[in-house]
């Protein structure tokens, strides 16, 4: 028949599903999934997931349906379908977790390695609940409701009993190893298998044979020479984690590279570190779907620093807000020039509509075109380099020169009008009535001081970012190219003022959309105690301000670390860079 007829029939079935016929119609969707073209399978898997999520009669039927779908179209199932299946299994009871793991292991053994989604979900469940496979499992369905196999088998009249025999640890590990040995095994499945090996070492500890446990650690260490850098890093980390869980310190560790704080190699690990390592290898806590969806939305938005929806500016005044509220912090791009016409005092300061302190002031000052602002700044306003042309319109205003330049000794504020004075003359600029008062002031100044602010900037500029829970971050700012003033190199130096090392250091950085950023990884994730011969941990950030002289550089930082066994997350805004230079 025509393919359009099938598509319309599929749409009709999808819209007819409700809580009363969900089992029968879902079975029809799965039957069509076997026969439909591959280009349509991904859409059908997503539709089945929505149906199961909305109308599922119980948890067992939901999990059974999703596993069956992965065995049919695991290759075409999206990551959302795989993640949802894992979340549903993790939220279910231990009895259902044992059933799901047994069924997934059997499906992996029967598969030829082509169902990528099935392998990803199955290997994850084996790593989390591998100890449940060591015991037999038996389940008797109360009726024909709640199990796909029983819905399809309409001939059975009595209850159906599902049984799985107990497996030994060696066969479980061998099944996962066989998957990774295939040439067609994708990279993400190999990564999940590496995590599975590390977790099975903890699951089989005390109940598995020593030979299998030793084999698991060898499988983890095997990936230290993998082609993928991610696999190499995880292999080294998991190996150190397994050794720490056993109370074994790294064989050779220095004070700056030992992630467990042991500097005398060959000793024993502290009890607190051992318990932390075992906790890291323990089962994953139950995932809340609402929290997961919120985190996914934040992660998607974090990749686009300027792509925040327009409905978020109302949340800008909140202190310590989300890292993603970039439009609120940096003025929102296009709406920034709107408050510029409302001149109140110096020609540039807009009316303060809200309490955004110096953040919005910086955005408005550097985006305002009038040239009257620089002379009236009480502070030494630096970015004169791009303001030569607007200054030409300044003499048109009938203003007393003593008001413009301050006191009679015009040393600092006078460099702006000096290039114009020799060309036009004092009589034309300031009017004919007081010519004799203007002439002594004009010849005193020469054009040379105008170039002095440009020559500044030699040597690194130090900017304090923040200090929180013993961790201090300071930026050393330099210009790598003398011919490119827009490009800057920021080197963040991390210092630890506590009496214990800081572990697991991560720093995320967001910039406005007029700034491009290239961020390198830190030199180490462990920050030793400051002082002595401790190596300073640094992280380099290369930024390019495409609107230098108009808008200033600003950074929104999010730092996470663990100090004295407590995980800390902190967010801060860094806007103290020299105006007009960065």
Image (cartoon, grey):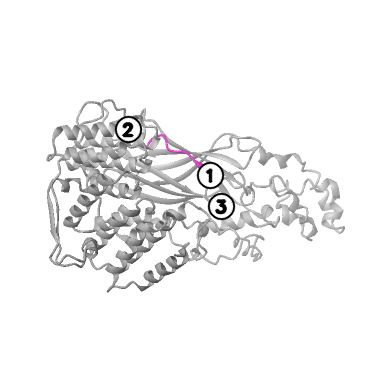
Is residue 527 among what the camera can see?
no
Q: Which residues are magenta?
A: 517-524
Q: Which residue is mark 1?
A: 517
Look at the image and tell me in which quarter the N terminus lies: bottom left
Work out whether residue 104 or residue 11 is closer to the camera in this orientation and state it. Answer: 11
Query: Residue 223 got which mark?
Result: 2
Compared with 447, 357 (above or below) is below
Residue lying at 39% horizontally and 56% vertically, measured from the top left:
296
Magenta part, dominant SS: loop
Q: What is the CA distance from the residue labelled 2 to the residue labelled 1?
A: 32 Å
For label 1, the SS is strand
Q: Earlier in the sequence, mark 2 or mark 1?
A: 2
Q: Which mark is residue 513?
A: 3
Residue 289 horizontal side relative to residue 103, left or right: right
Q: Nearer the viewer, mark 3 or mark 2?
A: 2
Secondary-structure class at tag 2: helix
Distance in Å between CA atoms under marks 3 and 2 = 39 Å
Percent x, y for residue 151? 23, 65
**Residue in the picture at 42% in, 44% down:** 507
């Amino acid at each position: 028949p025509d393919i359009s007829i099938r598509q319309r029939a599929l749409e009709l079935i999808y819209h007819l599903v409700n809580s009363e016929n969900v089992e029968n119609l879902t079975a029809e969707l799965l039957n069509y999934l076997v026969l439909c073209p591959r280009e349509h399978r991904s859409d059908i898997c997503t539709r089945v997931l929505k149906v199961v999520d909305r109308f599922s009669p119980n948890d067992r039927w939901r999990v059974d349906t999703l596993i069956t779908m992965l065995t049919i179209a695991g290759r075409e199932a999206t990551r959302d379908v795989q993640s949802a299946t894992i979340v549903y299994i993790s939220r279910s009871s231990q009895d259902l977790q044992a059933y799901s793991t047994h069924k997934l292991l059997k499906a992996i053994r029967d598969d030829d390695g082509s169902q990528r989604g099935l392998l990803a979900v199955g290997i994850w469940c084996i790593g989390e609940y591998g100890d449940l496979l060591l015991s037999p499992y038996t389940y008797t369905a109360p009726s024909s409701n709640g199990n796909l196999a029983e819905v399809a088998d309409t001939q059975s009249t009595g209850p159906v009993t599902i049984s799985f025999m107990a497996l030994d640890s060696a066969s479980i590990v061998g099944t996962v190893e066989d998957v990774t040995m295939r040439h067609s095994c994708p990279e993400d499945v190999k990564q999940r298998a590496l995590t599975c090996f590390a977790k099975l070492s903890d699951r089989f500890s005390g109940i598995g044979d020593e030979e299998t446990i030793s084999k698991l650690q060898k499988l983890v260490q095997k990936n230290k020479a993998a082609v993928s850098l991610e696999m190499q890093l995880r292999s080294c980390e998991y190996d150190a984690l397994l050794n720490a869980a056993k109370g074994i310190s790294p064989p050779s560790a220095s004070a700056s590279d030992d992630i467990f704080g042991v500097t005398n190699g060959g000793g024993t690990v502290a009890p607190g570190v051992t318990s932390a390592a075992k906790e890291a290898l323990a089962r994953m806590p139950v995932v809340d779907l609402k929290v997961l969806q919120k985190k996914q939305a934040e992660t998607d938005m974090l990749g686009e620093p300027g792509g925040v929806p327009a409905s978020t500016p109302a949340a800008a005044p909140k202190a310590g807000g989300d890292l993603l509220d970039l439009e609120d912090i940096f003025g929102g791009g296009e709406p920034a020039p709107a408050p510029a016409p409302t001149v109140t005092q110096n020609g540039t300061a807009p009316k303060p509509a809200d309490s955004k302190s110096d953040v919005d002031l910086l955005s408005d000052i550097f985006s305002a075109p009038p040239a009257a602002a620089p002379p009236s700044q009480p502070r030494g306003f630096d970015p004169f380099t791009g303001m030569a042309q607007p200054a030409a319109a300044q003499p048109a205003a009938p203003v007393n020169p003593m008001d413009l330049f301050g006191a009679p000794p015009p040393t600092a504020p006078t460099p702006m009008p000096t290039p114009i004075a020799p060309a036009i003359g004092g009589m034309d600029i300031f009017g004919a009535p007081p010519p004799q008062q203007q002439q002594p002031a004009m010849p005193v100044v020469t054009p040379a001081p105008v170039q002095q602010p440009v020559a500044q900037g030699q040597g690194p500029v130090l900017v304090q970012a923040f200090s929180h829970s013993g961790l201090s971050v300071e930026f050393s700012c330099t210009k790598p190219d003398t011919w490119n003033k827009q490009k800057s190199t920021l080197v963040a130096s991390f210092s630890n003022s506590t009496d214990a090392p800081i572990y697991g250091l991560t720093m995320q950085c967001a910039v406005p959309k007029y700034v491009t950023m290239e961020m390198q990884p830190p030199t180490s994730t462990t920050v030793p105690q400051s002082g002595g011969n401790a190596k300073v941990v640094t992280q380099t950030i290369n930024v390019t301000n495409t609107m230098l002289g108009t808008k200033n550089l600003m950074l929104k930082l999010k730092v996470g670390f663990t100090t004295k066994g407590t995980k800390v997350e902190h967010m801060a805004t860094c806007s103290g860079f020299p105006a007009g230079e960065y």
